[in-house]
Amino acid sequence: MKEKKTTYNDRIKQLFKAKLSPQEREELNTCPLINQALENQWEESSCLSTDSTKEEKILQGIRQSIEGHKIPKRSFYRLHSGWAAAIVMAILCGAWSLFLLHNTQEKEIWYVRTAGHQCMDSIFLADGSKVILNAGGKLTYPSDFSKEKREVHLSGQAFFYIHHDPKHPFTVHTKSMNVTALGTAFEVFSFDADDKAETILLNGKTLIETKDKQNQIKQRYILQPNDKLTLNANGRIDIEQTNADNYSAWRSGGRLRFKGEPLSMILPRLEKWYGQKISCSRKVAEFYRFTFSIRNESLEQMLNIMAQTAPLSYKLINDDYYEIKEITDK
């Protein structure tokens, strides 16, 4: 077992030096211990933090998970300063990339790009398409597209500017739907852990295919500009007209922006942005609308601003859970 862990350590160092063979990539990719260690440490990082003490804690956690015992701080930095620094840069930059290391017959290389809390990331794909990935989102995409079709996988919120190519449809796969376009601009809001998903079309035309739990296609819909399709938790489909440019205003400027949107739309996005849970009754969430943008404000500050402009109160239930209520006259 000790020899195996040492091998994985060597693989990681080779990965950051781009010296892994396809067989070695596959071996590293099949190690759940390493993948879980990286995922766990990512959750502890922040794109706004460069504190050296926190960096050391993150790096120690990764190696401790891999090697199975506590690592002295000094020996960690002395022995692994090169590839440790690479991991720090990857984790703390706000959004990081990691080879999926798929070893198929064509030896395709796939990437995972993840945006941290209070972060956005712009991604340019091989075909010229651009993706703006919002906080908490994860995009999986190939280094190059096949000759027949263009496909990516999303868990989260992202805005897509698709390069026009009628012969090669572009499909975004999520847990509950497929969104296919040729040359189109649209937003997808679909986190794997959520039951509700949305697609908002800015221009062009898209085909939406909803899926069941077995990943089989259930229904198909064609969206026109300014259509918003919502797949609800109970499986119901709602299609309504909205101002897509305003609805997806967050895609510009690198920060969350809302223009006259209800709390029912705002709160799920604030939850992903700050990584904290916010509860509010459906009646209240559908009634109150707000226009604002977020720069460096904390969640507490934003809730306070909303409470000052509407008859609302909020309360911190625990470290990561807020509750919003309407103030009514007795």
Image: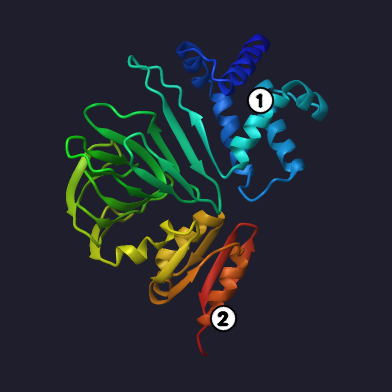
**Mark 2 residue element:** helix
Q: What residue type is labelled 2?
A: Gln
Residue 157 image offset from top left, x and y in percent: 41, 50
Q: Which residue is identified by label 2?
A: 308
User: Reading the chain from its start, which is encountered first: label 1 or label 2?
Assistant: 1
* Residue 208 position (above or below residue 257): above
Residue at 21% x, 28% y is 148
Q: What residue type is labelled 1?
A: Trp
Question: Which is more toward the observer, 130 or 41?
Answer: 130
Quadrant in the picture for residue 126: top left
Q: How many labels does the image show?
A: 2
Quick one: which residue is furthest to the front in this view?
128
Q: Which residue is identified by label 1?
A: 83
Residue 30 image offset from top left, x and y in percent: 49, 20
Labels 1 & 2 near each other (Cβ < 8 A): no
**Mark 1 residue element:** helix
Residue at 65% x, 23% y is 66
Quick one: which residue is furthest to the bottom in this view?
330
Specify whether residue 313 is in view. Answer: no
Quadrant in the picture for residue 100: top left
Question: Which is more toward the observer, 206 or 283?
Answer: 206
Q: In this view, does 110 lie to the left or right of 41?
A: left
